[in-house]
Image (spheres, rainbow, N blue to C red):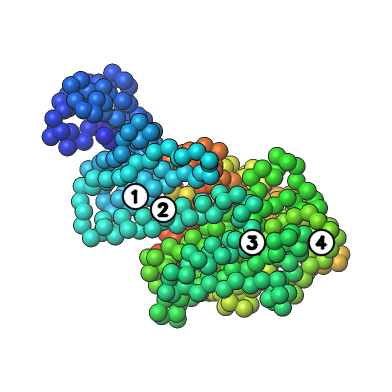
Amino acid sequence: MPVGARGALPDWLAGADLDPGWVAGALADTGNGGAPGGITNLPVPGRRPRSLVAVGVGDATPAHLRSYVAVAVRRAQTLAEHGATRLVLPLPAGAGPELVRVAAETVLLAGHRFRQTSTPHPPRLARVTLVVPTAGPAEVDALHRGLVTAAAVTWARELVATPPDTADPDWLAEAARERLAGHERVTTTVLGPRQLRAGGFGGLLAVGGGSDSPPRLVVAEHAPPDTAGRHVVLVGKGITFDTGGISVKTTAGMRHMHTDMAGGAAVLAVVDAVARLGLPVRVTAVVPLAENAVSGSAYRPGDVLTHVGGRTTEVRNTDAEGRLVLADALAHARLVLGADVLVDVATLTGAARTALGARTGALYATDDELADGLLGAGGAAGEPWWRMPLGEEHVAHLRPQLDSPVADANNAPGNPGATTAALFLQPFSGDLPWAHLDIAGPARAAADHGGTVKGPTGFAVATLLRWLEGFRPPAAGRVEGEPRRPARP
């Protein structure tokens, strides 16, 4: 049962054979005033079921509704272990299409779990029924979009959660090919070592050279019937496991390094959702896949790598590998695939997590319109972003840190680490509108909150999908603007 701000009760309660006055009094006694996500169990004498679960919905904003739905779903899943099979989830009066979409997404995402255990999984809810005030065509469409979004986020989570002894570059490439094969307008191409050598992918080949699992490049293009529109290319970092290479990480630092392909999983999931929704946008996911391992064939500090397009990098730290594979992919997207707009997504730097914490992504952009579109989409999706400065007056003094005596740049230019990583990548995007999304913080959650569950989060999928749903091509040219505050989720 939803309880609104200041303890307001739903209208349908009067017809549910319960005394609203008794319920209101009981809630007041417990102190439940309708705060979003606040929960109270009320025993109901002489009835079956014998208790009523009241969950606060606050002011019924999208953020408050996410808390309400997530708490209700998690409590119901707990009750499922004791025989409950169904959750009836009323939405508050006045809930329109946007709240229907938010509720549908949160139902599936808050209840998602990934397990590989030898014992049977605990019982789960068999059905969740959303009760909406109005069920017209707009609400039905919103429900569909919410379910497709949640399915895409869930797939991204499961790709990231799959243990690294399974999820090597070849497995992930085949998983993408199999999932996307069902879409008529999606073409998936996988490049192996021979094609990568022919294409000049020096960064990807070097990073993946120390592993027995050779690197791959996945290119998945969604082409609508009219392909005259601008071509959006999403590049996702796909390091299936990162030991740090010869600059080896500590054991604790490696614990969750199968999460290092979260960016790649995100962009593949976006293409899957775009195809399911039939969006009229030409969008391609490019995912460089490699396992950064230690062996006699591993690349070394001091090596000089030649990327797609000819730009060179001096390796100073083999644990700064993500930018090396992204560099190849960005250049390939621009020079070979004919990208008009570039967005990359990567668990790139611990510095981004240090700056913004574990729930906010860092956004760098060379185009104000592109940045504003992504920030607005993130606000609607409930994924917060913070635009980081990339204006010339801010970064001019940092660029000399990338200098190398033997190459065009070095791959470990120092602090501020998130910004110097963005500066390393920027030349590979050329003069195209480009955004760099560093999700090192929010790609993995330490605990459940809202629709997010402990473990891989699928962060950035919902933002990119919302952005593409309303995609308007940025104006030609590049504008290096000042940072702007993100839209509130």
> Which of the 4 quarters of the picture holds residue 111?
top left
Helix, strand or loop at label 4? It is loop
Helix, strand or loop at label 2? It is helix
In this rendering, which labeled residue sits more in front, label 1 or label 4?
Answer: 4
Q: Is residue 449 visible?
A: yes
Q: Position of residue 236 (x, y in %)?
A: 59, 61
Question: What residue is shown with label 3?
Answer: 169
Helix, strand or loop at label 3? It is helix
Which of 202/402 is in front? 202
Question: What residue is shown with label 4?
Answer: 297
Q: CA distance from mark 3 to mark 1?
A: 33 Å
Q: CA distance from mark 2 to mark 4?
A: 41 Å
329 relative position to 74: left or right: right
Q: Is residue 403 visible?
A: no
What amino acid type is highlighted by mark number 3?
Answer: Pro
In this rendering, which labeled residue sits more in front, label 2 or label 3?
Answer: 3
Q: CA distance from mark 4 to mark 3?
A: 17 Å
Q: Residue at x 70, y 52 (%)?
A: 242
Question: What residue is shown with label 2?
Answer: 150
